[in-house]
Image (spheres, helix red, strand yellow):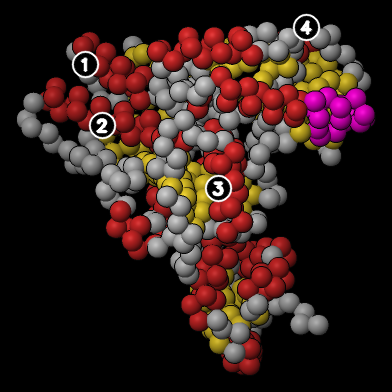
Amino acid sequence: MVREECKPFALRRRWSGVICDRKIFANVIDPEETRVAIVEGGRLNEIFVERMWDRQRSGEIYKARVDSVIPGMNAAFLNLGEGRNAFLYLEDARGTEVRQNLDLLVQVTKTARKGKGARVTTRISLPGRFLVLVPGGHETGVSRRVSEEQRERLRGYARAIRPDGFGIIVRTAAEGVDQDILEEDLENLLHIWDGISRMAREQDAPCLLYQDLGLVGRILRDEPFGAVDEIIVDSEEEYRNVLAFLERFPSNGSTPEVNLHRGNIPILEFYGIEKDLESALERKVWLGSGAYLVIDQTEALTVIDVNTGKFTGDGDPRSTILRTNLESAREVARQLRLRALGGIVVVDFIDMEDEEDQRELLDTLRELFRNDRSRARVFGVTPLGLVELTRKRARSDIRASFTRGCPFCGGTGVVPREESIAMSLKRFIRKVVLSGRPEALLIELHPTVASFVADSFLPLWEEEFGTRLFLRQVPDSSWDKYRLETQGSLKQVEHRIDLLEKRVAGSVVHRTDPS
């Protein structure tokens, strides 16, 4: 059932029950930033963010030109255009003799991060709803997450429809889907590939040939619909897009309910997700038992320490330790997904002498990661009692997405990025404007953030909200805090600004030119 309008408080009452166990929340109302949250059992499990100035580039296909080949690194540097370079391991060139000034068709597999260029491959893959098409490949594969009873049936379908010169990988979403649905998905992917090939022939390198779907579209494409109970969006346009997507790609299970969030309170704040997101940026994570995790990220790896904390157990030390470690394992798996952490991870669980308990812990971890969208591998317990695992790094972690090196401590800590504060401020402004429709607002905030907002967004926001906005710099303000100083008519706000400028020497107020 699809309702045209989401009734927020009614939905909130359903929140704690099992009626809607898995939900997708899409915060798309602001063109500058899209955020998508996946909530399971009332808890935030994954958060995705994409900003218009920092769009996810993984999956893009380029006609690139080789700038240089570094034999000692067995790699080459490629020019993607627009001043962007990429790194290609020669083993990812699939037998092509890579030389300087050679044009190559490549796909981004890892986006640039922390000064490192993007990584690319010549092995192109085009993901659809149910299939992945691999031009130049010959394989017929099935996702490891597909159940054994479905695997052979789907592999048979894939062999029957695979065209010459292409490989096919059947995705998890295809479980229970018939062959005609797979053929339809294949035809769509072949049409996309024909367009890419035509552009590659006609255009000079370096140039962009293909971009993947936007954030909401990618998540809907990659999520098994049968595992989602409800999709809630805060934009009428995106609401219609979601309905169209579900109609185009019918579910092989139950179709999720789609609702439009309306109201003065921003969608993620209303459902309590903003608080969960703030918690995900903290080092310490408390568990229900009173134990806690400490999560530290470094350039090389992520280290997680498990502590019993306030948990005292039932008097049996072995039982207490095992229960704490199993509870911690569940939270470790959740936190890695939530924080989008990848690479090498070392977990210092509480020491367990019994080998049977160690095996139970490792088996639990492997089962928890079995359905992770990013492949994870649990290696075992080291002689020092540490558990080592790896998880594929598919995107920037949320700390990199929402924070930056602190300008006040020389980078030893982190604070929210200016962009993140700006978008939080915009959501606050929208709430104020919708609540009272003031003609003008005066907001106080940190000078650096005030200048950033004024230079980047102020005229656009005034036009969007139909409200005059004044930003007053407050040097002793906290970096990420802001305060509504005055609201009302334009005359009232300007009078208040005059008083403040007379009272505080050197007061700086950002404003747009009314002409």
Residue 357 numbered tag: 1
Quadrant of the snapshot with the C terminus:
bottom right
Q: Which residues are magenta?
A: 194-209
Relative to residue 143, is residue 19 drawn left or right?
Answer: left
Badge 2 vs badge 3, beta-carbon distance below 8 Å: no
Marks 2 and 3, how far apart at CA: 38 Å
Q: Amino acid at mark 4?
A: Gly
Q: Which residue is mark 3?
A: 243
Q: Which residue is mark 2?
A: 327
Say which quarter of the image contains residue 61. top right
Q: Which residue is mark 4?
A: 95
Q: For the residues carrying marks 3 and 4, which lies nearer the camera in this image?
A: 3
**Of 489 and 349, the residue lying toward us:** 489
Marks 3 and 4, how far apart at CA: 44 Å
Q: Secondary structure at mark 3?
A: helix
Marks 2 and 4, how far apart at CA: 47 Å
Q: Position of residue 309 (x, y in %)?
A: 22, 39
Q: Secondary structure at mark 1?
A: helix
Q: For the residues carrying marks 2 and 4, which lies nearer the camera in this image?
A: 4
Q: For the residues carrying marks 2 and 3, which lies nearer the camera in this image?
A: 3
In this view of the protein, can residue 405 be seen by the observer?
Answer: no
Marks 1 and 4, how far apart at CA: 47 Å
Which residue appears at 66% of the width and 70% of the height? 464
Q: Is residue 205 magenta?
A: yes
Relative to residue 29, is residue 87 drawn left or right?
Answer: right
The extreme left residue here reads 315
**Mark 2 or mark 1: which comes first in sequence?**
2
Residue 492 numbered tag: none
Q: Is residue 128 magenta?
A: no
Q: Secondary structure at mark 2?
A: helix
